[in-house]
Image (cartoon, grey):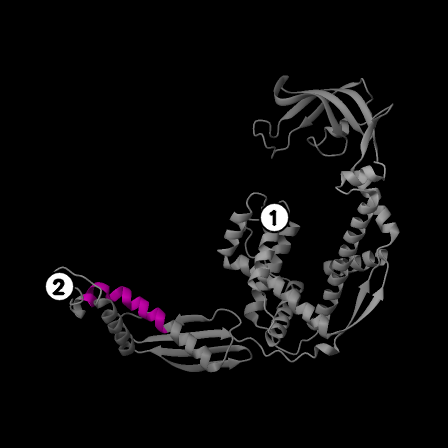
């Protein structure tokens, strides 16, 4: 099929092509001969049925098959001969709308090519990496947090306060009739835990042991038990004991609570955990600095076919974040027009994606299958008991596989750039690190 250029402006390319009726007929006849040897038709020996009869029987379906193969082979040969790499799937359409068997097929092929990315001298990139030492103060604070989480409750005199635990008997009624599952004795409830329906725990604050109260609440509209959802209820409640929280002692017993043999072993574990957290955080900041540097490379055009859908996706995501009461899977809100800020962010993402992909390709950076498998298994652990099903689902879903592979590839390219770049280390405190992270978050929100 002959291909002739129509447009070559910027990244946009369009071509016209013609498949003559004679070529189409020739391909159909070749198909007929291919299937003829295996076809059995009553009245004819196997493989001896007349071609005219076969064409009458199968010609329509073979016509569509031949057209698709001609289109596919034409596009493949065209891209090989030009060396073009389309930014997105090329658009192919027939320009003779009244096309029918026996006619020439006129096609138009349109796409944007990926831009040529200017060479980046990675060794000239200068970055600053923060280094944070784990201080004893941070370990002590982590120990105190663990002790609070492992708190006990001790009986106290006086009224219950938020954070206290009350031991109660209660009986729930709707329209003065007790309902199933609405009663308990000697139930230990931490006030402020949100364990009970909204409003229940707040009404127990200020009560002392021996006092009784009818707690009036309404079940939420989306309550799990449909027979109770949205209905007002009264809980006849008696406070039998009030207990104040007391943090666990920071000793070997606390360590055993968290699976360590001694307090020293627990401290060492906390120190390793904090060091890992600092390392991840400082790497994240360093990566952001690198991406900021790379995003300043604006000396190449961006394919609109990549920027526009990305901007729409950003606008769509932000709309749902702003309308949290809206079902995330309900897309009946109509078209959401991207803002200038959405487009700017989309351009940054596309630009960085192209730059990182170019660096990865030129330096033969690849993600191994076993690396992808490990990443899938890490995600699968979020679904206990369904790990295998999740793994198999992802493997059969190309888009999910790409969503897992893409960040792995990006991180490998980023690590490669780190090795090539000039990186100076700057010691900072954990507090300074937190401030840097907060500053970055604020910049991301602006």
Q: Residues within 10 Å of mark 1 (few under 14, many from 20)?
A: some
Q: Which picture quadrant has residue 334? A: bottom right
Distance from disc 1 to disc 2, alpha carbons, whole Å, reads 61 Å
Is 89 above or below relative to 389?
Answer: below
Query: Is 63 a magenta residue?
Result: yes
User: Which secondary structure is most common in the magenta stretch?
Assistant: helix
Q: Which image quarter holds the C terminus?
A: bottom right
Q: Secondary structure at mark 1?
A: loop
| Residue 44, numbered label | 2
Q: Quick one: label 1 or label 2, which is nearer the N terminus? A: 2
Is 278 above or below relative to 113?
Answer: above
Please provide the residue range marked out in magenta. 54-70
Whole-percent x and y of residue 43?
A: 11, 61
Q: Secondary structure at mark 2?
A: loop
Eye-nearest disc, 1 or 2: 1
Q: Which picture quadrant has residue 286? A: bottom right
Is 177 above or below relative to 27?
Answer: above
- The residue depicted at 62 percent of the width and 52 percent of the height is 378
- The residue depicted at 54 percent of the width and 69 percent of the height is 305
Q: Which picture quadrant has residue 51? A: bottom left
- The residue depicted at 82 percent of the width and 57 percent of the height is 435
Whole-percent x and y of residue 171?
A: 68, 19
Whole-percent x and y of residue 263?
A: 83, 43
Q: Nearer the viewer, residue 195 or 417?
A: 417
| Residue 328, numbered label | none
The residue at which mark 1 appears reads as 381
């Amino acid at each position: 099929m002959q291909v002739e250029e129509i447009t070559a402006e910027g990244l946009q390319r369009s071509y016209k092509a013609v498949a003559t009726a004679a070529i189409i007929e020739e391909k159909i006849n070749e198909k007929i001969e291919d299937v003829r040897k295996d076809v059995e038709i009553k009245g004819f020996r196997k493989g001896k049925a007349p071609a005219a009869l076969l064409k009458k029987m199968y010609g329509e379906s073979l016509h569509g098959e031949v057209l698709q193969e001609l289109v596919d082979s034409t596009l493949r040969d065209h891209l090989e001969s030009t060396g073009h790499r389309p930014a997105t799937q090329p658009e192919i359409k027939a320009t003779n709308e009244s096309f029918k068997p026996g006619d020439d097929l006129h096609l138009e092929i349109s796409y944007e090519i990926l831009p040529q990315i200017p060479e980046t001298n990675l060794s000239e990139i200068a970055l600053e990496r923060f280094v944070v030492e784990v201080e004893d103060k941070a370990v002590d604070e982590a120990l105190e947090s663990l002790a609070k989480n492992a708190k006990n409750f001790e009986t106290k005199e006086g009224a219950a306060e938020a954070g206290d635990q009350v031991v109660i008997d209660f009986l729930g009624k709707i329209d003065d009739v007790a309902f199933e599952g609405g009663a308990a004795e000697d139930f230990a409830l931490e006030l402020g835990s949100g364990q009970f329906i909204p409003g229940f725990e707040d009404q127990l604050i200020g009560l002392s042991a021996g006092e009784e109260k009818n707690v009036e609440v309404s079940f939420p509209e989306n309550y799990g038990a449909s027979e109770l959802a949205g209905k007002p209820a009264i809980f006849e409640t008696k406070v039998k004991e009030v207990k104040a929280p007391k943090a666990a002692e920071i000793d070997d017993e606390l360590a055993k609570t968290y699976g360590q043999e001694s307090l020293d072993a627990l401290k060492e574990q906390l120190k390793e955990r904090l060091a890992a957290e600092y390392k991840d955080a400082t790497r994240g900041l360093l990566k952001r600095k690198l991406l900021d540097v790379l995003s300043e490379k604006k000396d190449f055009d961006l394919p609109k076919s990549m920027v526009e859908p990305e901007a729409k996706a950003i606008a769509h995501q932000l709309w749902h974040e702003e309308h949290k009461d809206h079902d995330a899977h309900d897309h009946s809100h109509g078209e959401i027009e991207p803002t200038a800020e959405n487009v700017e962010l989309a351009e940054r993402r596309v630009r960085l994606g192209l730059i990182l992909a170019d660096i990865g390709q030129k330096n033969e950076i690849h993600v191994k299958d076993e690396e992808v498998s490990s990443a899938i298994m890490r995600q699968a652990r979020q679904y206990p008991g369904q790990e295998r099903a999740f793994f198999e689902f992802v493997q059969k879903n190309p888009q999910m596989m790409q969503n897992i592979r893409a960040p792995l590839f990006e991180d490998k390219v980023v690590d490669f750039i780190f090795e090539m770049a000039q990186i100076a280390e700057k010691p900072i405190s954990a507090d300074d690190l937190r401030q840097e992270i907060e500053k970055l978050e604020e910049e991301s929100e602006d």
